[in-house]
Every structure is written in C-alpha cells, then in structure tokens.
Image (spheres, helix red, strand yellow):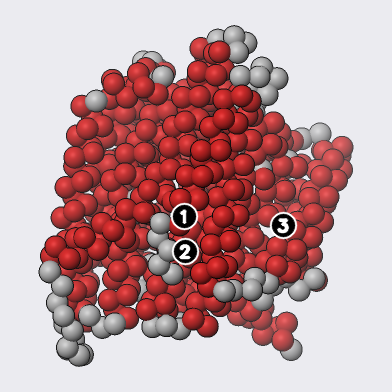
Amino acid sequence: MSKTKFIKHAAILAVASLLVRLLGFLYRLPLTNMLGDEGNGIYSAGFYLYNFFLVMSSAGLPAAISKIVSEKVALEEYRNVKKTFKISLILASTVGLIFAIIMFTSARFFCNIIGSPDSYYTILTLSPTVFIVSVMSVFRGYFQGLGTTVPTALSQVIEQIFNAIFSIYLAYLLVGISLPLGAAGGTMGTGIGALAGLIYILIVFLNKKRYINRKLSKKTHKYRIETNREIAIKVVKTAAPIIAGTAIFSMTNLIDMQMVNSRLLASQAFTDSEVTSLYGQLTGKYVTLTTLPVSISTALATAVLPSIASSMVQRDIKTVRRKIDVSLRLTMIISIPAAIGMGVLADEILLLLFPKYSEGGSLLKWGALSIIFLALCQIITGILQGIGKMTTPAKNALIGSIIKIPINYFLIAIPSINIIGAIISTTVCYIIASILNFRALKRATKIRPDYNSILFKPTIASIVMGVSCYFSYKGIFYISKNNTISTLISIFISMIVYLVSLAVIGGFKREDLSLLPMGRKLISILER
C-alpha cells in the first residue's frame, strides 16, 4: 500500500471511528440522564465484563487477519488468502459461540465476582453479542487486509446508529420498572447494533464475492499452498499476543471495578449506593469523554498495521519509517490539545452534557493527561504489531497493569482521594506502557523521531490554546451568564486558536493537511 493510499484509508477509518465515538458519546447523554450515576455504574459493570469476553474471543482477529492477508496479497499468494479467510471464520464462530454460552450460563456467578449483583440482566442481554461480533471481526479484518477500510468503516457506523437508537428506546421503556432493567435495556442496543453491522458487511461481501474471487484467482507464480492446520496455527499465533495485550488493558477495567467497590467500602466513608454512583462517574463520564479523542489513534492503529506489514514483507524500510512518522505526529496533534482542553473545561463540559448529574469534574481534571498516553500506547501498539513485534505490547501492558494495582489499593481507600486514585493509577499504567513501547519501537526500527514536530510543536500550540480557552470562557460567561453558550463558543475559539498556532509554528506537514476537508486545496494555497 502506497503512502497516499495509507493516508486515505487511515482517514476513512479515523472519520468513521470519530463518528462512531461521537454517536456513542451522544447516546450516553440521554442514557446517563435517565439512569443517573448509579444506573451508569450497573450498566458499566456488566459492559466491562462483556468487553473482557469480547476481547478474549475476537479482539485480535481483525488485526491478525488483516496482517496475514495483506502479507499474502503482497506476496501474491492468493489461494492462501482465501484459505485464511475460511479458516478464520470457522475459528471465530466456534470460539465466539463458546464464550457467549459461558457468559450467559454463568451470569450470576460473574455478578458475584465483580461485586455488582444488579448487573445480572445486562450480562444476560450482552452475551449473544460476543458471538455476533466474533463473526463480524473476521469480515472486517479480511477487507482491511485486501486494502479497503470502507466496509469496516461503514459497518461500524451502522452498528453504532442502531445501537444508539435501541439503547435509548429500550432503556426508556424498562427504567420505569427498575434501574437494573433500565441498565439492561441500555445494553440491548449493543447486540442489535452488532447484528445490523454484521448484516451490512455480509451483504457487501456477497455483492463483492465474485469480484474478490476473480481477483484472488489470478495465476502469478508458483508458491506453496498452506494446509488448514498451518493457517489455523498462524492465525492463532498472530492473534494471541494481540488478544493478550488488549485483554490486559481490559483486565485493568475489571480490576478498577472490583477495587473501587472494595476499597471505597473499606474506607467506611461511602455507602453502597454512593460507591456505585462514583463508579458510574468514572465509567460513564471520565471514560466516555477521554476515549472520544483516542478513537482517532485507534483508527490509525487499525490502518497502520496491515499497511506497515505489507511494506515490511516487501522490505521497504524507508516507507515503513515514513508511515511511522505520520502516525505518531497525527496522534499527538490530536491528543495533546484534547487533553489540555478537557482539563481546562472539565466542570463546564460536564454541566453542559449532564445538567441533571454534573458531578465528576475532578475526575476529568486529574485524568485528562491519560488521553495523551493512551493514544500513544494505541498507535505504537499498532506499529509494533505491523512490524512483527506481536508480543512486545502485551508484555509492556502487563508491566503497566502490575504497577497499577498497588497504586489503586492504597489511593482509593483514602477518603480525600477515593475514586481519583483509580484515574491516577490508570494514567501511570499508560505512561509506563507508552514509554516501554516507544523504546521497543526505536530499537526495532532504528527510527530517529522528529520530537519537534511530534511533541514540542503540538504542545506549544496546545498551551496557547489552553490559555485562550480559559480566558475566553471567563469573558463570555461574564457577559452571557450562560454555561452552554460560554462552553460551546470557547471550544470553537480554542480550535481556531490551536490550528492557527500550529500553522504559524510550522506544526503541519503536507500529509497532515491532506487528511483535512479541502486539505489539498489548502496545500495549493499555502504553496503559492
């Protein structure tokens, strides 16, 4: 895949991922206002358990399949491409079904383990989704490996649209009966959305099947046809370390859930209801808001893996280094201002979004820094996997998670710190994993990072933006006395200030501008 195509496909996934996150964020607003912080805690406890099962069954499949398929396409081993898809589909269906059954039949058992008995119905309603997403992940990885991100992007958007509509509607119907059922109604939309996404991608596959088969039937050169067993082993070996790395971070969410419940109660400063509410603030506000900008780096990581894998198998090291440079720079250009802006307007943003339940601003202020390091961790993980260092991110994630546990244990039980301890430990976990990943990347690729364009210029522009954001809000609020107007206008002003500041100090490059709407016209204007 050429650099131009890589940027194009990264842009498609980035836009789709941002739209998906935005839709997910928007539907959580009425959901939170219906369920409250306590209902959010019930919802999130079940959802995080589901997410762990999802990770174990299919998280590594799209990346693994896209990597293997892109390598086979680059080597023109087209029959092995088709066999990889078929074997992957069988593996994913089997594993997904097993995990879905385990989750459904053991729902009460898992409720007791995570300390959230009210999450029983959310676990039941989410269990079939594990199987649906496992199957869908194979198709997404296959298309990405063939060099197109459009089916994946559109299936994600369709999935989230159905998810948003049915989550809100079913939560509204059931919350009047009980809060646990209302939370379960909010999770039912997840399965309906996943089914809609699967149906769409199946339709695309069937429509393109003849074209794909014709493309993959070309006779190019003699090569060895791999056996089913060899392909299955390769898929498992490629997916396992990706699953392990993702599972470790998923486990940190379960650790937070269990330790927040136990350590807050151990402090004897909070009731059961207050603990659930604090956990709802952590997951429904802090996690929801901070992962919104990180979705861009997640999309870049998804696009960069097969692209870099293809360049690596062709031994085009120069192109690999260029793609790494673009990925790192774009990640920091987006995540640094997002972190500073969210930290500056934490209370104001929550009051704007959750007028009935606006508590939790301190969580955003303390946790804004985690946006930068989570984004960095995501993108470097995708790069390392693309160059064949599959186990490295998992090992580094494990080290970060191990260090997180004692920090959680001591800080959460301090009444004056309470749930902020979980945010501090999470940030430390991401910082450590990011640093270790970055060191591994430098050793593996011998790259010389351009710290000036990757780090220093976005930071300078972000600081200017942060100062502008603070004073513009204060000035507008002094005149309008309205938080909504002041927050929205100050955010808009801050975005303009950031882009102008970055342009003035030369923080943009051609590759970055080409990703923006009307970007090519902007490049031609600047070059005149």
Q: Residues within 10 Å of mark 1 (few under 14, many from 20)?
A: many
Residue 497 seen: no
In this picture, residue 441 sits left or right of residue 88: right
Alpha-carbon span between mark 1 and mark 3: 33 Å
Residues marked 1 and 2 touching at CB (< 8 Å): yes
Q: Can you say whether 300 is above or below 219 in the image?
A: above
Residues marked 1 and 3 touching at CB (< 8 Å): no
Q: Residues within 10 Å of mark 2 (few under 14, many from 20)?
A: many
Q: Can you say whether 21 is above or below 153 in the image?
A: above
Q: Can you say whether 219 is above or below 491 in the image?
A: below
x and y, in percent, of residue 435 in the image:
60, 54
Residue 393 numbered mark, or none: 1
Q: Which residue is mark 3?
A: 495
x and y, in percent, of residue 14 in the image:
50, 61
What residue is drawn where x is 14% and y is 62%?
Answer: 229
Q: Amino acid at mark 3?
A: Met
Q: Can you say whether 366 is above or below 20 in the image?
A: above
Residues marked 3 and 2 touching at CB (< 8 Å): no
Q: Nearer the viewer, mark 3 or mark 2?
A: 2
* SS at badge 1: helix
What residue is drawn where x is 45% and y is 57%?
Answer: 392
Residue 93 seen: yes
Alpha-carbon span between mark 1 and mark 2: 7 Å
Q: Earlier in the sequence, mark 1 or mark 2?
A: 2
Question: Which of 503 and 427 lies nearest the eye of the viewer?
Answer: 427
In this picture, residue 203 sits left or right of residue 347: left
Image quadrant assignment for residue 208: bottom left
Alpha-carbon span between mark 3 and mark 2: 32 Å
Q: Residues within 10 Å of mark 3 (few under 14, many from 20)?
A: some
What residue is drawn where x is 66% and y is 62%?
Answer: 333
Q: Amino acid at mark 1?
A: Pro
Q: Which residue is mark 2?
A: 384
